Image (spheres, rainbow, N blue to C red):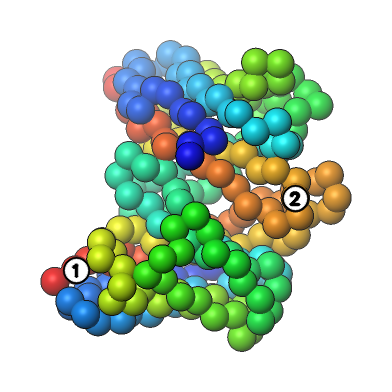
Amino acid sequence: QQQVKQSPQSLIVQKGGISIINCAYENTAFDYFPWYQQFPGKGPALLIAIRPDVSEKKEGRFTISFNKSAKQFSLHIMDSQPGDSATYFCAARANFGNEKLTFGTGTRLTIIP
Amino acid sequence: DGGITQSPKYLFRKEGQNVTLSCEQNLNHDAMYWYRQDPGQGLRLIYYSQIVNDFQKGDIAEGYSVSREKKESFPLTVTSAQKNPTAFYLCASSRPGLAGGGETQYFGPGTRLLVL
């Protein structure tokens, strides 16, 4: 049972463009939505996270947009750079006290010159 | 230098053999997790532990076992019952969040398990 659906599976963006990755969830108990960045052969690293009490969070070139009524959230990477080429995972956590994260299936992002 | 270490980086398993993956953290985190990563399937939770001497099954626990005898260590054993063990295994840890809050999960560098 996939509780977090992520799209697209892969994405190619030109340098300087905007990369957009989308996630949708079903469980209304989710209350924490992080995005992780993973380079080949490495473990994922937290990029940015949001809680449902705000609709947007920005950190540098990275922005999360959150739509609680639609149960959707997205990652926007502005001025995309070749160094942003990686796999991105969205995730969600329900505050049941066990800190379990449910991950999306990942998006492989490639930034071309 | 705080963080999570996993060893070995690559591990080869023969048919019918049990193998153990090591995960150590010096972040003083109470919670630790094991994930399996397969291409196109994201990260799937195998086992997690919120406190020493206690652990719970995740979504795909069959064929795996864990122990949590020390706060810093959470080894994962891939048993011979796991028929398709080839994957990238990731260990993570976190400090339990406050009510209504949440804490980041920090990941180790991973172990790639291959079957001979």
Visible residue check, residue B42:
yes
Q: Residue furthest left?
A: B116
Query: What type is the residue that disc 1 sits on?
Result: Val
Left or right of B16? Residue B97 is right
Do callouts 1 and 2 mark residues in contact (Cβ within 8 Å)?
no
Crowding at dot 1, Cα within 10 Å, few <14 / some 14-19 / many 20+, comes out as some
Is label 2 in a helix, a strand or a loop?
A: loop
Image coordinates of residue B50 in percent, x first then y, are 68, 67
Q: Measured from the top left, where is residue A18 in percent x and y?
A: 47, 15
Residue ID for mark 2: A96
Compared across the picture, whether B66 is left or right of B68 comes to left
- Side of B95 where B66 appears, left or right: left
Q: Position of residue A28 (x, y in %)?
A: 70, 31
> Among all residues in the image, which is located at the extreme right?
B99
Relative to A18, residue A86 above or below: below
Residue at x 45% of width, y 19% of height: A19
Q: Quadrant of the C terminus of chain A?
A: top left
Residue at point 44%, 58% (across, down): B60
The x, y position of residue A67, in whole percent, is 68, 17
Residue drawn at (24%, 82%), measured in percent from left and top? Answer: B17
Against B66, is A57 above or below? above
Indicate the chain on which mark 2 is placed. A
Q: Secondary structure at mark 1?
A: strand
Q: Residue at x 53, y 48 (%)?
A: A45
The answer to which quarter of the image holds residue B20 is bottom left
Q: Which residue is mark 1?
A: B115
Crowd around label 2: few <14 · some 14–19 · many ≥20 (10 Å): few
From the viewer's perspective, is the residue at label 1 or at label 2 nearer? 2
